[in-house]
Each structure stands twice: as structure tokens, then as C-alpha cells.
Amino acid sequence: HTLTSAVISIEAGEKLLGQSSTEALEKFSLAKDQVKRGLDDIRSSIKAIQKGEEKAFTAALYELLDDIHQNTGLDISHIAELKSDLLPIQKHVLLVAVKECATNSLKHGKSTKADLLLQEYKGSIHMTFSDDGKGTDDLSFGFGLQNMAARIQSLGGTMTTQSTKGEGFTVSISMPTGTRAEGEPA
């Protein structure tokens, strides 16, 4: 998605080149940033698939939540009840989703608190991230939410959002638990 957006920005820049060089340069700069972001996403995904996450998922999650709190002040209460050993790509996608949810809570919702629930039920992993932010009645997905939804869908999952002005924002993710190929280390 990010790379497609970059192509659209480049095409818009090309059209503006003869009309307004300043606006064209802004479109090209935006496209450059989108390509960089897309490459970073691709590199991170490939690294997660090839190498796997070094730490156990819950340890990496708790470290991430602590980092978020230390760096931003966002207080995230959490419950993680997973029975299965997640695939490296699932670990990566879920950790990136938590980062994106926290970023959006702070940036758009001006949140101070959030709740994170991760559970496994009937062969599926369910994650819910809810914040106490300002919420909205007019939700439009930016690049972060679009990319998160695409990553979840690529793993056979779904992502939904819910928000009401003055009542915070909730992201719900569900994906099937994965299984490793025979002989792969857990």
C-alpha cells in the first residue's frame, strides 16, 4: 500500500511539474518518504520471517509496553493469555500493531491510558487495544492503520475499529494461530 501511494504521489508530482515546481517537489518528497517507509516495512517483515523474533513474544511485548510508557507516558494496562508459540511473522505483526495503536492513541486521540488484551481462543489470536482518547465520529484510515490492516489480512486475519467522539478508540484484531513446518524450531 505504501509503495502504491508513492507511485500516486510521483504521478501527481509529474502533472504539477509544469504548473508549480514547489508543489511538484512536495509530492516528490512525500513519495520519497513513502518509499523509505515501505522499504523499512519490507525489511522488517523479511527479517522477522527469516530470523524470527529473538525474544519470547511476551517478553518482547512487555519490553515494548515499558518503552512506550517510559518514552511517552502512555499507561497501558495489559493482559496477555496466549497458549501457542506464535510464528515469527505473527510476533512481528502484533508488536508493530501495538506500536501503531499506541502512536495513534497519543498523536490523534491525546490519550493518557490504554488497555491491551491478547487472548487465544478456538484457534485464533485476538487482540484488542482501547484508549481513553478523544475519539471520533468521522474515522478515516491513514497510512499506519491501512498498513496494519494489510499486514493482518496477509496472515488471514481481520482488523476492525470502533470510535465515538469523546469515548476513545478501539482496534480489534483476529488472526488464526499459525503452525510451524515440521522440524522448525519453536
Image (cartoon, grey):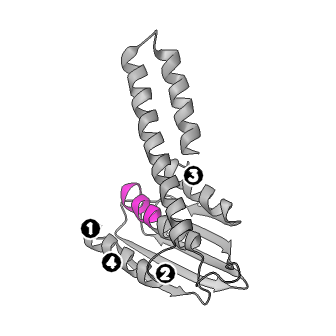
In contact (CB < 8 Å): disc 2 and disc 1: no
Q: Distance between the residues labelled 3 and 2?
A: 24 Å
Mark drawn on residue 146: 3
For the residue pair 145 and 109, the one nearer the viewer reads as 145
What segment is highlighted magenta in the picture? Answer: 99-108
Looking at numbered disc 3 in the image, what kind of residue is underneath it? Gln
Q: Where is residue 27 in the image (x, y as percent from the top left)?
A: 44, 27
Mark 3 or mark 1, which has the lower sequence index? 1
In contact (CB < 8 Å): disc 4 and disc 3: no
Label 4 Cα crowd, 10 Å radius (few <14 / some 14-19 / many 20+) = some
For the residue pair 56 and 167, the one nearer the viewer reads as 56
For the residue pair 96 and 114, the one nearer the viewer reads as 96
Q: Which residue is drawn at 63% across and 81% down?
A: 184
Magenta region, main secondary structure: helix
Q: Residue at x 53, y 70 (%)?
A: 94
Label 1 Cα crowd, 10 Å radius (few <14 / some 14-19 / many 20+) = few
Q: Where is residue 156 in the image (x, y as percent from the top left)?
A: 71, 66
Q: Where is residue 10 in the image (x, y as percent from the top left)?
A: 51, 27
- Residue carrying label 2: 57
Q: Which residue is drawn at 39% across and 27% down?
A: 26
Residue 114 sits in quarter: bottom left
Marks 2, 1: nearer the viewer = 2
Tell me: 89 left or right of 121.
Answer: left
Q: How far apart are marks 4 and 2 (CA)?
A: 14 Å
Looking at numbered disc 1 in the image, what kind of residue is underneath it? Asn
Looking at numbered disc 4 in the image, what kind of residue is underneath it? Asp
